[in-house]
Each structure stands twice: as structure tokens, then as C-alpha cells.
Image (spheres, grey):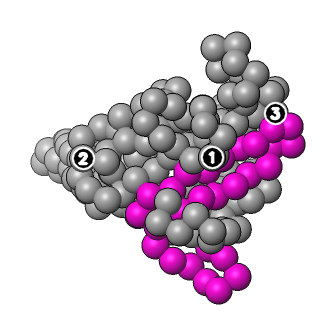
Amino acid sequence: MEIMISISIIIMVLSLTVVNYKGANKRTEIIIWADKMVSDIRLMENNALAVKTFNDDSTRNVWGIYFNTASAETNGHYVLYNDADGDQTFDSGETYRDIILPNHIVIDKVEGEDISGTSAIIECSVALIPPDPTIKIINHDNVSKAYNKITITLLDTINGSTKTVTINFFGLVEVAS
């Protein structure tokens, strides 16, 4: 009788562990993608610090990251770019890498913060201008507005978990819950 009770307790503990492991595995994926986004942003910072050019064109040394949350077609990816026309914003034909997120992970929102508070941004470029690099956060809907930082929220549509990536005008990039 005691052996049966012991075995049933062990089975219950094992089943709880297996169930929790699967949930933790799903939460890990959004953490990995948030860390990848931070890594990609730091790659663009390093390219700007090194005054790296694109295809040996010395005028193409501004690197950046582009986000667009306008629709389901655009919020499933972000673009690493190299500015070709000198406006420091992303335009078609300036793609360095297009980073496609998994189907269930989306860029839920992008928010910019300035002296008047926080506001939603639909489409923005984060330009890294050498040699410092100077960080310029550009809202495509209002290019004259200057932001101190932006927060990008990633959402896992399966389990509802979120991760936020913050970039400030000093170039500090971090992941928060």
C-alpha cells in the first residue's frame, strides 16, 4: 500500500514537471527573439562605430533599424538598413537584412518617448550616424519630432507573453519583461 502511494506521488510530480516544461519552452522563444533583436541593433551600432560602408560606397555609412506596425503584413518583421540617399530613414532598396519573426511572434507596438510624454509610433527608423554613433529616432509620420527613446513590444500570440526592447538616444539597448 505504501509503495502504491509513493508511486502515485512520483507520477503526479513528474506530470506537473512535464506540463510546466512545455509552457516554459514556449515562453523561451519570445525571450530568444527579443535577445536577437538587441543583438541586431548592436550589430548596426558596431557598423556605425566602425564607419563601415556598404558595397565600398563611402557615402553609405549610416546604419539603422526600421519598424512598421501598420498591418499584419508588416509587424512580423523588422529591417536592418543602410541609408543610401542621406535622409537617415529607411526607404525601399536600402535593406541590409530583413529579419522575419516566427508566425506567432509580432511587433505589437512601438512607442516613442519625448519631453511631452509617450506616444504610439506606427512606422519609425532608428538611424545610427557615425562616428559616435549619434542615435536618431525618426517617426515616419512626423519626421520633425525627436524622441529620447523608443520601446518595441514583442507579443507571442499563442500564450500572450510579451517582451520589450528599449533603445535610448545614447545607444543603450535593453530587454525588459
Sequence-earlier tag: 1 or 3: 3
Instruction: Say which quarter of the image contains residue 129.
Output: top right
Q: Determine which residue is flagged by label 3.
A: 49
Tell whether position 127 is magenta: yes
Relative placement, left or right, of 143 versus 91 is right
Sequence-earlier tag: 2 or 1: 2
Q: Determine which residue is flagged by label 1.
A: 87
Marks 1 and 3: which is nearer the front?
A: 1
In the image, 149 versus 122, the foreground residue is: 122
Q: What element carries label 2?
A: loop
Q: Position of residue 2 (x, y in %)?
A: 20, 48
Report how far apart the C-alphas of labels 1 and 3 lie in the structure.
19 Å
Q: Please, what is the three-letter code of the amino acid marked with disc 3?
A: Leu
Res. 39 visible in picture: no
Magenta range is 113-139
The disc label shown at residue 73, or none: 2
In the image, 6 versus 47, the foreground residue is: 47
Q: Please, what is the three-letter code of the amino acid marked with disc 2?
A: Glu
Q: Where is residue 109 in the image (x, y as percent from the top left)?
A: 41, 63
